[in-house]
Image (tube, grey):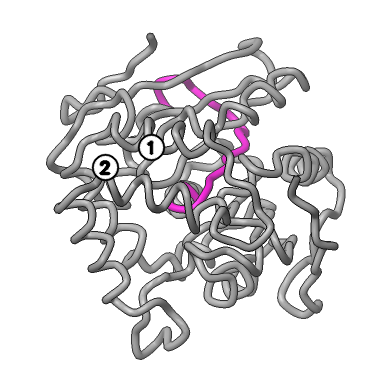
């Protein structure tokens, strides 16, 4: 079980599969999950000849249940230390939800030659919280409710999130998948409650506006208008306007955890982007691209 110890002594668990000289894809998971959330993508892209790497963020999964360092700067610093340890060059970084924020901060600060492309899926940038400067954001009361749920009975709130809005299982006509719900709950309960509690502030209040402006590598944003966790209108359409070289792929009916419920579509988007294809609408000037609804069995 590979682990890496950071400067402050935190043990970071990671997976590293594939040929050492292959193109690297580094996956970053969302809250409160682990690298296991990328199971489908790890196997798919490994089969496409890539070297795939995914880590459990500090306080999550099999990494140390830290009570400190649960902030976006430290998350990105941990990634920097790990990628330096592995000496990764021209890697592709893919992040989901909070992991998309982690990718954004890391890529914005990465040394030249470390990153070639990035993909943000249902990601939190630029800023989730409603403020005077971000009037379309989510009110603080919603995040306070998450905090109360985690502190009071995280086992129950994790079950509620997984069986409801995260995968869209609360939508009419969508059949809940018991294995998906249990796997989300399993991953959540593996991590530490203090880190998960602190991370709510991270994903809700971290302003990544300036980070997005600093990124000069190509970035693909994938987001759905029916995302019930990270509202579409206040995320990807705003983020793509801040990027120097971004493109946005918009779906209309997919859930927040779309790479789990619809891996064929998401994997195809990512693979096309990695191969240099135009899979979304570039820049801010073009109208939003809305894919045809995909039926859920």
Sequence-wise, which precedes: disc 1 or disc 2?
A: 2
Measured as percent of width and height from the top left, residue 176 is found at 58, 45
From this view, report whether residue 153 is shown above or below residue 246.
Answer: above
Report crowding for label 2: few under 14, some 14 to 19, many 20 or more residues within 10 A (C-alpha): some
Query: Could you say which is closer to the camera, residue 89 or residue 287?
Result: 287
Residue at left offset 35%, top offset 43%: 32
Measured as percent of width and height from the top left, residue 42 is found at 62, 25
Query: Would residue 48 appear left or right of 114 to someone viewing this image?
Result: right
Q: Which residue is mark 1?
A: 185
| Residue 50 image label | none
In the rendered image, residue 129 lying in the magenta stretch gets the answer no
* Quarter of the figure that contains the C terminus: top right
Query: Would residue 38 appear left or right of 48 to someone viewing this image?
Result: left
Residue at left offset 35%, top offset 21%: 13
In the rendered image, residue 90 lying in the magenta stretch gets the answer yes
Q: Which residue is mark 2?
A: 155
**Helix, strand or loop at mark 1:** helix
Residue at left offset 36%, top offset 59%: 203
Residue at left offset 23%, top offset 68%: 144
Location of residue 4 (image quadrant): top left
**Helix, strand or loop at mark 2:** helix
* Quarter of the figure that contains the N terminus: top left
From this view, report whether residue 186 is shown above or below residue 108.
Answer: above
Measured as percent of width and height from the top left, residue 287 is found at 80, 78
- Residue range in magenta is 83-100
**Disc 1 versus disc 2: distance between alpha carbons?**
8 Å
Tell me whether the residue at label 1 lies in contact with that at label 2, contact meaning CB atoms closer than 8 angstroms. Answer: yes
Location of residue 25 (image quadrant): top right
Query: Would residue 228 appear left or right of 68 to someone viewing this image?
Result: right
């Amino acid at each position: 079980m590979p682990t890496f110890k950071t400067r402050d002594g935190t043990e970071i668990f990671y997976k590293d599969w594939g040929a050492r000289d292959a193109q690297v894809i580094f996956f970053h998971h969302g809250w409160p999950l682990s690298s296991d959330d990328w199971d489908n993508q790890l196997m798919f892209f490994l089969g496409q000849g890539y070297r795939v790497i995914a880590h459990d963020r500090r306080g999550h999964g099999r990494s140390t249940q830290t009570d400190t360092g649960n902030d976006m700067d430290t998350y990105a610093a941990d990634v920097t230390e790990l990628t330096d340890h592995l000496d990764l060059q021209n890697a592709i970084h893919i992040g989901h939800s909070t992991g998309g924020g982690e990718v954004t901060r890391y890529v914005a600060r990465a040394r030249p030659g470390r990153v070639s492309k990035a993909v943000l899926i249902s990601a939190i940038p630029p800023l989730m919280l409603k403020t005077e400067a971000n009037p379309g954001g989510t009110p603080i009361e919603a995040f306070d409710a998450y905090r109360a749920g985690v502190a009071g009975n995280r086992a129950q709130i994790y079950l509620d999130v997984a069986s409801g809005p995260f995968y869209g299982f609360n939508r009419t006509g969508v059949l809940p998948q018991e294995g998906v719900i249990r796997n989300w709950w399993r991953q959540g309960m593996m991590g530490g409650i203090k880190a998960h509690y602190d991370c709510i502030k991270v994903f809700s209040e971290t302003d990544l506006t300036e980070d997005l402006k600093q990124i000069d590598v190509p970035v693909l944003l994938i987001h759905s208008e029916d995302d019930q966790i990270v509202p579409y209108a206040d995320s990807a359409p705003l983020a793509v306007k801040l990027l120097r070289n971004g493109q946005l792929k918009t779906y209309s009916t997919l859930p927040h955890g779309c790479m789990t419920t619809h891996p064929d579509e998401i994997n195809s988007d990512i693979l096309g982007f990695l191969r240099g294809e135009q899979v979304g609408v570039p820049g801010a000037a073009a109208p939003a691209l809305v894919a045809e609804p995909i039926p859920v069995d």
